[in-house]
Image (cartoon, helix red, strand yellow):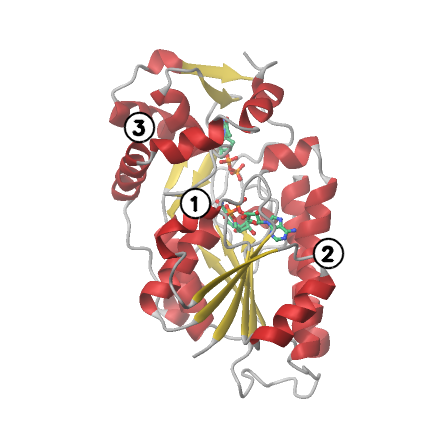
Amino acid sequence: MKNLLIAGGAGFIGSNFIKHLLSNYDYNIYNLDKLTYAGNLKNLDNIKNDKRYHFIKGDICDRQLLGKIFDDYNIHIVVNFAAESHVDRSIEDPEVFSKTNILGTQALMDTAKRYWKVKPYDRYCREYKDGVKYIQISTDEVYGSLGITGKFTEENPVSPNSPYSASKASADMIVRAYYETYCFPIIITRCSNNYGPYQFPEKLVPLMINNALKEKPLPIYGDGKQVRDWIFVKDHCTAIDTVLHKGKLGEVYNIGGNNERENIQIVKLLLNYLGKSEQLIAYVRDRLGHDRRYSIDNTKISTELGWFPSYTFEKGLEETIKWYLDNQEWMDEIVSGDYIMYYEQMYSTSF
Ligand code: NAD
Ligand code: TYD
């Protein structure tokens, strides 16, 4: 049985991924999460008693704790989801993004490198005997913004525009450098915008669902014609699974859902599903440095590893809306806490 350290497993994608792993493999999972505002143990309620699952509260920047985790649990694989993940928050307060996303990544790799006794021994070695590896969960946002045509391939230069994407791009550079310099066994994934169950309602889809259900205005930044390439979180999980088991060390894999939509289209779709009026739509001041369009070219992961997304946007969105309707307590608990202050601060001058 393998021992996996999942960093940031109490967040949106990490918690979905832990459940995916436990349903498909007999692995021991160690979930290290600081439980920031975005971390929520309720996301893992239905597996918390699984004997293969263990939660550790802590910070990926805490090198002493990391050393103890590697010593105590003989970690073979690290999947790093832990991050500050919201662009708007990074515009307000960028420092913590650099700390967690860059220095935290480095601390995880340094600990694993020491524990796995990685040596720069063979430039062409593509696999370590015992299968140890480090997967960095990155984002398509590191590539910057596209015009009306074109797609991001893994060959695109990294050109981030927000403090969030700059911190993720910086982490990617360090991860890549550890492979080139030390033969540290890494793989980087760069995925497009996720949606699905357990997403924190600061992100577009759950924020709009929550506001629509409460008949509050739906704040659309700028003209609402920015394009994102949406992927259902369960498809992202199968892609990470594929990369983890079949990916080549030292490589970057883009992951996307082949679902480009303008923000305004998504919001109208949501309102339509929920039977709410488009009168709720409110155009507000644009985000600073707002990227216009993202679009992922999936060719590499599809042709080399045989992964394809399985959800259409309509099916994924329907499943997502149903989940939020069935789990209103989960949402209400979040939006009644610190979220009130966040929302006030972020949106009070917008309307
Ligand atoms: P999230 O904000 O929902 O979850 C992040 C988790 O990391 C939380 O549980 C939080 O408590 C934890 N965390 C934060 N700082 C930490 C620290 N210092 N130490 C330990 N834990 C810490 O984010 P998400 O949407 O689940 O994203 C997960 C990863 O996927 C991130 O690295 C993000 O950059 C990447 N990603 C996200 C998307 C998306 O659309 N959400 C798309 C592509 C890539
Ligand atoms: P978001 O979910 O924050 O993801 P990202 O910025 O990482 O792509 O936002 C998705 C898109 O929706 C982005 O173009 C910004 C826009 N948006 C709004 O128009 N209004 C909002 O209240 C939010 C949160 C996002």
- Give the image location of residue 174, x and y in percent: 70, 62
Q: Give the residue type that dot 2 points to.
A: Leu
Using residue 335 as the reference point, say whether residue 45 is left or right of it: left
Q: CA distance from mark 3 to mark 1?
A: 28 Å
Q: Which residue matches tag 1?
A: 42
Q: CB under 8 Å between callouts 3 and 1? A: no
- In the rendered view, tell whether residue 74 sits above or below residue 10: below
The quadrant in which residue 347 appears is top right
- In the rendered view, tell whether residue 193 sits above or below residue 76: above
Q: CA distance from mark 1 to mark 2?
A: 28 Å
Foreground of the two, 177 or 56: 56
Secondary-structure class at tag 1: helix
Q: Give the residue type that dot 1 points to.
A: Lys
- Tell me which numbered mark, 1 or 2, is placed earlier along the sequence: 1
Q: Which residue matches tag 2?
A: 103
Foreground of the two, 59 or 82: 59
Q: Which residue matches tag 3?
A: 269
Q: CA distance from mark 2 to mark 3?
A: 39 Å
